[in-house]
Image (spheres, helix red, strand yellow):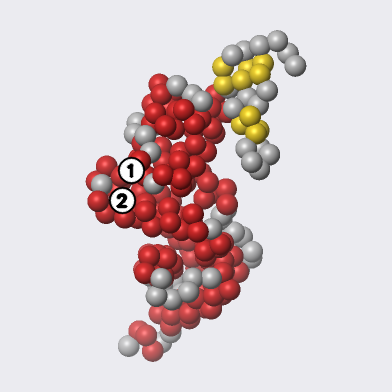
């Protein structure tokens, strides 16, 4: 090992993080370590109990390093979730709108296999209703996920799979509304196996918007 370089620390999954070179964590390593630490701590402690100090200690970086990249805890936490979710759920392109939405919904509903993530999402949603400083970053994260579904629907319109006059904003709200309502209330199941049927119901409703009968 070259002089001045210390070995990287490994996560339980075997991923190397926090490699030091010349006594300093490389910039990208530090950035990734902070994002990972933010998610870990929110899932362990809940949003309110997490502090910048705790994140810095977990990531093995200085507080000043964190504030150089993020202005607040809220912005950092939601940036961490945006990055993680984009990696877990990239925009699908199966060749059809039905396939794209089903793939996306299946991955979205897959959160039910992770109780800690479910608890965390519920906590973040609740926090967004109570803390104005958190509500903005949370809404921006929600909008980033809505943008993916809006893009899929718009592509469906261009392909001729949806009528040109379909209300894509409302359709996106229906798509995520079902997810969040079942996630929060738990009155009905939310399982990946249900994704295809939910997408079919949504698309059938959109198709009727363009039918002659709906124009009367």
Which residue is found at the position 63% from the left and 24% from the top? 19
99 left or right, relative to 50: right
Which residue is found at the position 45% from the left and 21% from the top? 62
Crowd around label 2: few <14 · some 14–19 · many ≥20 (10 Å): some
Dot 2 falls on a residue whose secondary structure is: helix
Query: Is residue 155 at all visible to an observer of this figure?
Result: no
Residue mark closest to the camera, 1 vs 2: 1
Quarter of the image with the C terminus in it: bottom left
Decide which of 14, 156 is in the foreground and name it.
14
167 left or right, relative to 207: left
Are the residues flagged by discs 1 and 2 in contact, CB closer than 8 Å? yes
Q: Is residue 22 above or below residue 196?
A: above
Q: Position of residue 126 (x, y in %)?
A: 31, 55
Which residue is found at the position 25% from the left and 51% from the top? 130
Quarter of the image with the N terminus in it: top right
Decide which of 70, 64 is in the foreground and name it.
64
Task: Say which residue label 2 marks.
Answer: 127
Dot 1 falls on a residue whose secondary structure is: helix
Crowd around label 1: few <14 · some 14–19 · many ≥20 (10 Å): few
Q: Position of residue 31 (x, y in %)?
A: 51, 30
Q: Position of residue 44 (x, y in %)?
A: 46, 45
Task: Say which residue label 1 marks.
Answer: 48
150 left or right, relative to 135: right
157 left or right, relative to 127: right
Q: Position of residue 189 (x, y in %)?
A: 48, 74
Sequence-wise, which precedes: disc 1 or disc 2?
1
Q: Is residue 207 above or below residue 126?
A: below
Query: Is residue 16 at all visible to an observer of this figure?
Result: yes
């Amino acid at each position: 090992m070259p002089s001045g370089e210390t070995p990287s620390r490994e996560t339980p999954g075997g991923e190397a993080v926090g490699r030091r070179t010349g006594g300093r964590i490389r910039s990208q390593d530090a950035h990734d370590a902070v994002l990972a630490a933010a998610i870990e701590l929110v899932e362990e402690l809940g949003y309110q109990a997490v502090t910048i100090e705790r994140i810095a200690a977990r990531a093995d970086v200085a507080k000043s390093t964190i504030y150089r990249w993020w202005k607040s805890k809220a912005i950092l936490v939601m940036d961490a979730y945006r990055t993680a979710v984009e990696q877990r759920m990239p925009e699908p392109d199966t060749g059809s709108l039905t396939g794209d939405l089903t793939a996306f919904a299946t991955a979205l509903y897959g959160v039910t296999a992770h109780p800690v993530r479910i608890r965390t999402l519920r906590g973040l949603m609740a926090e967004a209703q109570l803390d104005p400083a958190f509500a903005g970053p949370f809404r921006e994260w929600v909008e980033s996920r809505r943008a993916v579904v809006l893009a899929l629907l718009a592509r469906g319109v261009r392909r001729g799979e949806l009528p040109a006059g379909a209300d894509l904003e409302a359709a996106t709200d229906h798509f995520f509304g079902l997810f969040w309502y079942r996630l929060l209330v738990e009155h009905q199941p939310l399982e990946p196996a249900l994704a295809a049927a939910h997408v079919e119901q949504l698309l059938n409703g959109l198709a009727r918007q363009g039918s002659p009968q709906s124009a009367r």
